């Protein structure tokens, strides 16, 4: 399989360079929605809706490195999509590993490379520390596709990336918050797992605004590592301290829910007609409904459904067609209580 795969991929990459002049179309807003799967289109090299079998008739071997599905509703949906896509019925022999510890992810990835998987599908817990894995994969003829999260590496070290633009998510949310025109922004900032692509992107946008504007202040900035109970404790501590706040910026919906629970227990109003603005991220249907009913103010969409696009990229590569784009971003709008509709919930909620 590795020999056939190498020939197919070499042909695909040569065709891609000839057609595109070796260019890279990745970047903010570069991808267009395909309207059905909720993922970005990869242009002329996009996946066929009917998966093609491996040329040799053998199963394509993949190692899937993901985060803990218990981390959040987003991650549960993401993991379920990967497991339902990379099956023997769909032409794959897949090995899955879920862990939020980057060191354990890296060790398992090295083992998968030694086991000679054809493709390593990677959602890294940390953006850094993967250089040796990527080099070893390249040397072994294992092709790396990133999904869900980016990492800091030269694009030559992976075949494609189907990811969320976490920095753009943060910028969209912060711009929305700025448009609310508060006299003063006193913010409880609840961060996700430190060093992850989602945390870096969503924190970066808010940090930049707080550093630039005199009336934007952190009441507290603490990591809850995606955990709802920890987020609730952080907000309870601020309430008990007597400090004034009017914004909670939580980097995922579970942490926002924990924060809201603390507010409710203290009798503090929130949402569209309340005293505290609530911001969350991801794609949970229940969170979108919280925005729809006005108990939350804003949710930044983070689309967990990359599996179909990754499957299409692999099948196209096996047939000699490279992705038209190296980095494919999911289309991810923000939703606020003033404009969200039931159709939005039905379309984007997971």
Image (spheres, rainbow, N blue to C red):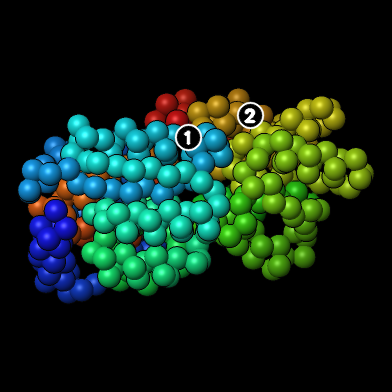
Give the Cα separation between the discs numbered 1 and 2: 25 Å
Q: Which residue is drawn at 78% across and 28% down?
A: 264
Secondary structure of the residue carrying numbered label 1: helix
**Residue ID for mark 2:** 294
The C terminus: image quadrant: top left
- Taking the spot 66% from the left edge, 51% from the top edge, the residue there is 191
In the image: residue 92, left or right of residue 320: right
Residue at x 61% of width, y 52% of height? 193
Q: Which numbered disc, 1 or 2, marks the residue closer to the eye?
A: 1
Considering depth in this image, is 52 or 295 the residue closer to the camera?
Answer: 52
Name above or below for residue 63 compared with residue 130: above
Judged from this view, the residue extending furthest toward the left is 56
Where does the image place residue 292, in percent across and percent down from the top left?
56, 28
Residue picked out by circle 1: 76
> Of the residues under marks 1 and 2, which one precedes in the sequence?
1
Q: Which of 81 and 293 is in front in this view?
A: 81
């Amino acid at each position: 399989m590795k020999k056939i795969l190498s020939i197919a991929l070499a042909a695909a990459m040569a065709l891609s360079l000839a057609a595109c002049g070796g260019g890279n179309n990745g970047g903010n807003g570069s991808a267009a929605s395909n309207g059905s799967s909720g993922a970005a289109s990869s242009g002329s090299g996009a996946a066929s809706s009917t998966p093609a079998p491996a040329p040799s008739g053998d199963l394509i071997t993949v190692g899937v490195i993901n985060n803990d599905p218990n981390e959040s509703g987003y991650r549960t949906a993401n993991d379920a999509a990967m497991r339902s896509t990379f099956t023997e019925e769909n032409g794959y022999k897949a090995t899955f590993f879920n862990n939020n510890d980057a060191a354990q992810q890296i060790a398992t990835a090295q083992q998968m490379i030694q086991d000679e998987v054809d493709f390593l599908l990677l959602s890294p817990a940390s953006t850094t520390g993967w250089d040796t894995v990527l080099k070893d994969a390249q040397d072994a003829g294992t092709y790396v596709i990133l999904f869900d999260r980016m990492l800091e590496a030269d694009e030559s070290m992976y075949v494609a990336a189907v990811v969320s633009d976490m920095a753009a998510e943060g910028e969209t949310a912060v711009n929305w918050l700025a448009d609310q025109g508060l006299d003063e922004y006193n913010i409880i900032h609840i961060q996700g797992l430190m060093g992850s692509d989602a945390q870096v992107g969503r924190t970066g946008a808010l940090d930049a605004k707080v550093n630039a504007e005199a009336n934007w202040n952190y009441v507290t900035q603490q990591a809850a590592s995606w955990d709802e109970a920890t987020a609730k404790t952080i907000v309870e501590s601020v309430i008990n301290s007597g400090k004034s706040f009017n914004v909670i910026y939580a980097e995922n919906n579970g942490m926002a829910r924990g924060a809201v629970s603390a507010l409710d227990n203290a009798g503090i109003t929130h949402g569209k007609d309340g005293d505290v603005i609530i911001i969350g991220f991801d794609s949970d249907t229940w969170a979108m409904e919280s925005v729809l009913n006005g108990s939350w103010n804003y949710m930044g969409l983070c689309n967990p459904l990359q599996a179909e696009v990754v499957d299409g990229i692999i099948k196209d590569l096996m047939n000699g067609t490279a992705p038209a784009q190296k980095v494919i971003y999911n289309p991810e709008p923000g939703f606020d209580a003033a404009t969200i509709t039931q159709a939005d919930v039905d379309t984007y909620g997971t």
